[in-house]
Amino acid sequence: MIVALVLLAAGLTGCSAVRFGYNQAPELVYWWLDGYADFDDAQSRRVREMLGQWFAWHRRTQLPDYAGLLQRAQVDVLADTTPDRVCRWWHELRRRGEGAVDQALPAAADLIPTLSAQQLKHIEARYLRNDEEFRRDYLAADPAQRLKDSVKRTLERAEFLYGTLDDEQRERVARLVAASPFDAESWNAERLQRRNETLQMLRRLSAEPADRDAALATLRAHVLRLSRSPREPYRQYQQKLETYNCAFAASLHNATTPTQRQAAAAKLKGWEGDFRALATAAD
């Protein structure tokens, strides 16, 4: 989801920072995309126009919906939960992310046929740099270091919502991470397959331009493969991991204190207010 990308890229934490980051999002996303494709002048103008249109749609139609979700979450976060309920929340968020991606595909179908061979090489080179970053972040040679890194990432995410965890809660996180079926090697193998399939798709659409409807159908089929791997072993792994993660999140949440839940509710309320203010600014 582009909103998540922007917030992560800007390292935002406060409410006013969320509003500032979202207002800067078209420019931030433009430069992120340009880092892959190295747009020429004509493409730059078109991409900026496309991003302006997408964010106008997103601000007008999606932010009010996100605010409603956050309002509901403020109630849920105060009570105990179950793995099934966590998974239902995850599926709701995923559906919205898929809708946001689909809204961008017509613009992508117009842009991709204009990419040159040199730009495709630039995209491939950027993917290779991503591989280096992935290996550094997730594939430490020492298994103990991998586990330590994974625990650290998980604690940071949990404390971002709930505030500081106590020793018992941190130990719970460490145990749950250690028992997780998460397999960085499997994830990496899948992402390399997806990268190669994406490059093949880009080369095909740029070398043999199809009509817009055909290009759009190709993109939608590709996005579907990205969300649901055509490789059965990976689909089974992904389902196993999702089921575990929902149970993990429920277990950790149910171990939080009333004070931590109130802190989480306050944070969610702040984000709700930000999204409503941003949506109102579109009127």
Image (cartoon, rainbow, N blue to C red):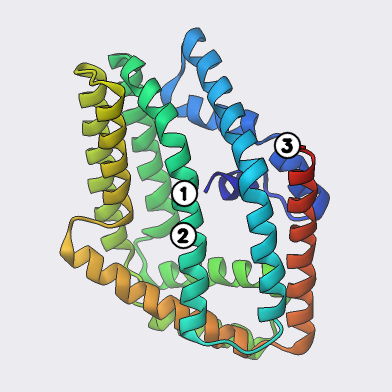
Disc 3 marks a residue whose amino acid type is: Asn
State the separation of the CA atoms marked 3 and 2. 23 Å
| Residue at x 32%, y 15% (from the top left corner) | 118
Q: Which element type, helix, strand or loop, lies under badge 1?
A: helix
Instruction: Please state, as top left, top right, bottom left or bottom right, where the C terminus lies in the image.
Output: top right
User: 57 and 44: which one is in front?
Assistant: 57
Disc 2 marks a residue whose amino acid type is: Arg
Say whether disc 3 or disc 1 marks the residue closer to the N-terminus.
3
- The residue to which callout 2 is attached is 94
Establish if 92 lies above or below 39.
below
Closer to viewer: mark 3 or mark 1: 1
Query: Would residue 171 be visible to someone looking at this image?
Result: yes
The disc label shown at residue 23, or none = 3
Residue 199 rendering spot, x and y as whole percentages: 26, 33
User: In this figure, what is the number of numbered marks?
Assistant: 3
| Residue at x 30%, y 55% (from the top left corner) | 188
- The residue to which callout 1 is attached is 99
Say whether disc 1 or disc 2 marks the residue closer to the N-terminus.
2
Disc 1 marks a residue whose amino acid type is: Gly
Residue 124 rendering spot, x and y as whole percentages: 31, 30
State the separation of the CA atoms marked 3 and 1. 21 Å
The 10 Å Cα crowd at callout 2, few under 14, some 14 to 19, many 20 or more, is some
Residue 221 rendering spot, x and y as whole percentages: 26, 43
| Residue at x 73%, y 36% (from the top left corner) | 23
